[in-house]
Amino acid sequence: MKVSVLLPVYGVEKYIGQCAESLFAQTFPDIEYIFVDDCTRDRSISVLREVMTRFPQRAAQVTIVSQDRNRGLGAARLKALQHATSDYVMHVDSDDALPLNAVEKLYNRIVETGADIVDGGYADICEGRVLREFKPDKHGKEAYLKRMLCQNVTSNRIWGRIYRRSLYTDNQVLPVEGIDYSEDFCLVTRLMLHARRAWIDDVVYHYRNDNCGSYTHQRSEKNMLSMFRAQALVNNYFREHDTKGTYATALQIGALNACREALRNGFSLERAETLIDYVPRGFVPRLCLGMLRRRWPMPLFRVVYLAWRRLYVTFACRC
């Protein structure tokens, strides 16, 4: 098979039928489907098998892998990637769906360009209705990666893209068990450091934003810890591989965003700093962190922080 489509499965009984139908009905024939059952407690796998009976031509292309216990999203993505055998991979969340020609369009573009990652457009879906469509970010690779590292400037989504599988294996960039919240940020930024990137404007992904049980909609202490761990892993990875310091300022902006999120969610700032392993360098980063440590009013912090971020994005992330 030419493309492996990888899906974690947990607690998606209500949605996985529509998702699986959109995958099995793809116009592209050479797809390997790998579903990882993360010990889901509902009928998700039963629903998946019911859909498979309506697509007998796809049956031999489907692999369902079961975890020994519930290990979380990061571990499920890792397990799926370890079972992938195709040259290219796509990540799909099992409560979302793909337009029928999504795989074909992304595959054709990555072969045509020789890129390592191809982004497509995506649409927000709520109760079956398209709310809004988004085009991919068209900045150059360096500017785009800086914007991702800043956080909350551009999308760092793992889905809606196709990846060359060797990008993971050649650079030892893999999903990490225990990083379930911010796992997109943790994985995509590290991959992008080594990647050649291209894009298409076509909508290739339907993102469901009405599933309140998804990781995106949760801010538990466990997920906050995952976010800090993701930030630390990315910081350490770039310290090792970004020898020229090209992305150092963007990383500081992102780390301060994580510190701000700690306070906004009632988390200990001191503990967050330790987990992130954040040491501010330069006048503005030290000023911003000092404001947080002294519990200055958050609106005042936002003025300083966002002004600094805006200037950086405007002048350092233009091309």
Image (spheres, grey):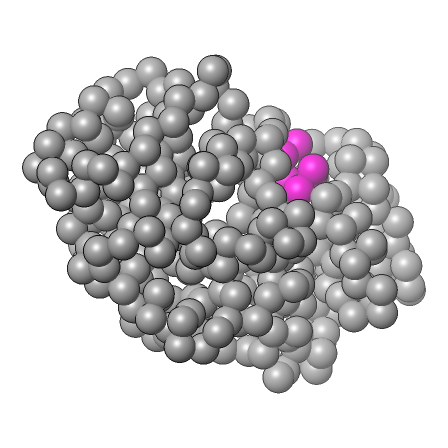
Q: Is residue 197 visible?
A: yes
Which of 20/208 is in front? 20
Residue drawn 39% across and 43% down?
6
- Whether residue 98 appears in magenta in the rendering, the answer is no
Residue visible at 47% across and 58% down in the picture: 163
Q: How many marks?
A: 0
Query: Magenta part mainly helix, strand or loop?
Result: helix
Residue 130 visible here: no
Residue at the image point whose x is 58% and y is 57% from the top:
167
Left or right of 97? Residue 168 is right
In front here: 268 or 240? 240
Picture layout, residue 71 above or below residue 16: above
Residue 104 location, x and y as percent? Answer: 27, 64
Does the magenta segment cover residue 228? yes
Q: List x then y, in percent, for residue 284.
A: 85, 64
Q: Is residue 80 above or below residue 188?
A: above
In the figure, 292 relative to 43: above or below?
below
User: x, y (%) of residue 281?
Assistant: 90, 59
Residue 81 appears at what percent x and percent y?
48, 41
310 left or right of 42 in image: right
- Indicate the quadrant containing the C terminus: top left, top right, bottom left or bottom right: bottom right
Identify which residue is drawn at 13% across, 43% down.
57
Magenta extent: 225-230
